[in-house]
Amino acid sequence: GVPLTSHAQTCGLLGNSGFESDLSGWSTSGPVAITSDVHSGTKAARVGTGQGGVNRAGVVPITAGQPVTFQVWAKVSGAPAWAGVGVDFLNAAGAEISEVSLPVTSTSYALQSLTPNPPAGAVNARIWTWKSGSTGNLFLDDFCITTSTAPPTTFNVTVNKSVRHQTIDGF
């Protein structure tokens, strides 16, 4: 359809998050092209019928233990062997410590969202997508990654059994 409003090109820590500037800021593997089959705006990325993916060029700085929210609108067509999106967590040397991923199976754009806590030693996140096999397409649009810098909320609870109420320090 025709978009009624323009789409922001920066979401969280990502510029060109919706491919309106083509593949600027992204790296590709395999048959990747810009398409007009979009979630919003006028452009999206499509991984074609061969095996391949679209990855964010560079890394996103993160803090171990502080939640990271990763989102992308994605869909498939033509039944690929496997299609998915994910985030790798890297240590200071650039080695992968762990990853989180979601398969993409919907044939209409659906929000894929993860909010993992990066493991101890993680300093960067790397965004990736992948489509396996020689059939089907993976469509991607409107990526977003945000980090939480708020400290964990802690409070003390005092229970006095001689009265019928409880107090929470700080409230």
Image (cartoon, rainbow, N blue to C red):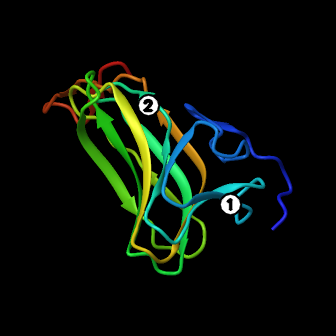
Against 88, residue 78 (above or below) is below
Q: Look at the image and tell me in which quarter the N terminus lies.
A: bottom right
* Kind of residue indicated by mark 1: His
User: Residue at label 1?
Assistant: 39
Q: Which residue: 26% across, 27% down?
A: 91
Tag in front: 2 or 1: 2
Give the left or right position of residue 107, taking residue 69 as reference: right
* Camera-nearest residue between 86 and 4: 86
The image quarter in which residue 10 lies: top right
* Residue positioned most to the left: 161
Determine crowd level at label 2: few under 14, some 14-19, many 20+ residues with C-alpha closer than 10 A: some
In which quadrant will I find the C terminus?
Answer: top left
Q: Is residue 127 left or right of residue 156?
A: right
**Residue 57: image location, x then y, percent:** 50, 36
Could you tell me which residue is drawn at 76 percent across and 53 percent down? 41
Helix, strand or loop at mark 1: loop
Question: Is disc 2 in contact with disc 1, using a CB cutoff of under 8 Å?
Answer: no
The residue that mark 2 highlights is: 59
